[in-house]
């Protein structure tokens, strides 16, 4: 099947598309009318179905692919010699070894309250006790559930600590001495070390830095877009090598920061946006890689959509599509989704109709 090509030029309103000085910013609403082509050429065509679904208005920017959160692990125990340390890139989970001083392991437990005292039968009640007991339960050290997870360090808690110490191969005292564990909010990915094996490790000395193991993309958006974004907004990503991935906005910064260029001229104020990302299986373990981000700022649900290439200029102005039957139907375009290539339409079509598009 062939059809004479008509203009498919689609202009956009200033809700998102600006073409100037060779720069394209996408995410737009179809509003103005195209001009008819000066000549007509025959091109092969095929048909595409009119479907009901969702379209999103988007804008693009660059982001950085990495890990969420930052941690600094500080030695809280007595002074000694650093005899081991987890290497950069290593992942340390609950109960894992972060580093060793004089051959004794300092291990990771989960919690938001940093270790600040010994924990034993003489410890006063506190939320750090509850935090420890949650870890003991999670590590299977209370098989009979004799320990109550609360703020009170009891004999059952001491018994669970002894089981943990037996598992770790250390003296079974039932007491957890300050400096033997580090509490962080979850599994850690070691980013780098701030001390070397063989060096002295004193109290309050930083040993290593790390992040969580949650993959995220961070980007700076202009402050004027801050109110257009909210947690849960969908995001599309293009990773190095053209790998496609999806995600969602996790948090939007509250405070805008302004920078200057190399000559000291002020730049637009920006806020940081953090986005989750779901990468396909087998994706390389990138860190601090540059990715392309496509953020949705408007979404239309349960609307009729056609490929944008189906739109034709209508004599007298506006748009129409050519149906598979050979007849034309007038349509009114709405949002264009540059990720899917679909455009919202209303008018003379319904779900299930087939429209002509250029053959791929």
Image (cartoon, helix red, strand yellow):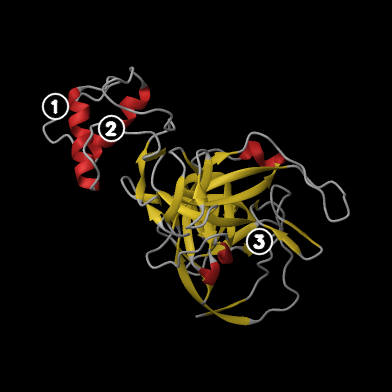
Q: Which SS class for mark 2?
A: helix
> Residues under labels 2 and 1: Cα distance?
13 Å
Q: 113 or 272, which lies in front?
A: 113
Percent x, y of residue 325: 46, 68
Q: Is residue 210 above or below residue 1?
A: above
Q: Is residue 100 visible?
A: yes
Q: Is residue 350 visible?
A: no
Which badge, 2 or 1, is on the more N-terminal residue?
2
Q: Which SS class for mark 1?
A: loop
Q: Residue furthest top?
A: 124
> Residues under labels 3 and 2: Cα distance?
68 Å
Q: Which mark is residue 94?
A: none
Q: 325 or 336, which lies in front?
A: 336
Percent x, y of residue 248: 49, 47
Q: Residue furthest left?
A: 144
Which badge, 3 or 2, is on the more N-terminal residue?
2
The residue beneath circle 3 is: 314
Q: Is residue 163 left or right of residue 153?
A: left
> Residues under labels 1 and 3: Cα distance?
78 Å
- Give the image quarter of residue 258: top right
The residue beneath circle 1 is: 146
Q: State if disc 3 and disc 1 touch (CB < 8 Å).
A: no
Residue ID at (32%, 21%): 123
The residue beneath circle 2 is: 134
Q: Which SS class for mark 3?
A: loop
Q: Nearer the viewer, mark 3 or mark 2?
A: 2
Q: Is residue 291 above or below residue 39?
A: above
Which badge, 1 or 3, is on the more N-terminal residue?
1
């Amino acid at each position: 099947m062939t059809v004479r090509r008509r203009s498919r030029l689609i202009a956009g309103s200033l809700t998102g598309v600006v073409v100037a000085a060779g720069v394209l910013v996408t995410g737009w609403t179809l509003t103005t009318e195209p001009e008819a082509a000066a000549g007509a050429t025959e091109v092969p065509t095929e048909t595409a179905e009119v479907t009901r679904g969702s379209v999103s208005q988007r804008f693009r920017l660059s982001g950085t692919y990495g890990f969420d959160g930052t941690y600094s692990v500080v030695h809280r125990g007595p002074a000694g010699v650093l005899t081991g340390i987890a290497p950069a890139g290593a992942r340390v989970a609950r109960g894992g070894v972060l580093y060793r001083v004089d051959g004794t392991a300092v291990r990771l437990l989960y919690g938001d309250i940093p270790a600040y005292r010994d924990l034993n039968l003489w410890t006063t009640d506190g939320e750090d006790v509850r935090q420890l007991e949650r870890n003991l339960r999670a590590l299977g050290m209370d098989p009979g559930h004799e320990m109550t997870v609360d703020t009170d360090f009891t004999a059952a808690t001491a018994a669970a600590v002894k089981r943990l110490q037996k598992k770790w191969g250390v003296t079974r005292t039932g007491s957890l001495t300050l400096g033997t564990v580090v509490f962080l909010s979850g599994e850690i990915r070691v980013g780098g070390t701030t001390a070397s094996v063989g060096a002295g490790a004193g109290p309050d000395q930083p040993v290593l830095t790390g992040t969580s193991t949650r993959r995220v993309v961070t980007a700076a958006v202009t402050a004027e877009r801050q109110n257009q974004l909210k947690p849960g907004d969908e995001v599309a990503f293009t990773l190095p090598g053209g790998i496609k991935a999806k995600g969602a906005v996790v948090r939007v910064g509250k405070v805008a920061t302004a920078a200057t260029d190399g000559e000291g001229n002020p730049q637009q104020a920006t806020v940081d946006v953090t986005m989750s990302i779901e990468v396909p299986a087998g994706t390389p373990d990138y860190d601090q890689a540059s990715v392309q981000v496509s953020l949705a700022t408007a979404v239309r649900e349960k609307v009729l959509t056609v490929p944008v290439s189906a739109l034709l200029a209508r004599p007298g102005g506006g748009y129409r599509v050519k149906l598979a039957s050979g007849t034309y139907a007038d349509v009114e375009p709405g949002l264009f989704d540059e990720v899917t290539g679909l455009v919202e339409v209303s008018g003379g079509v319904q779900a299930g109709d087939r429209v002509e598009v250029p053959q791929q």
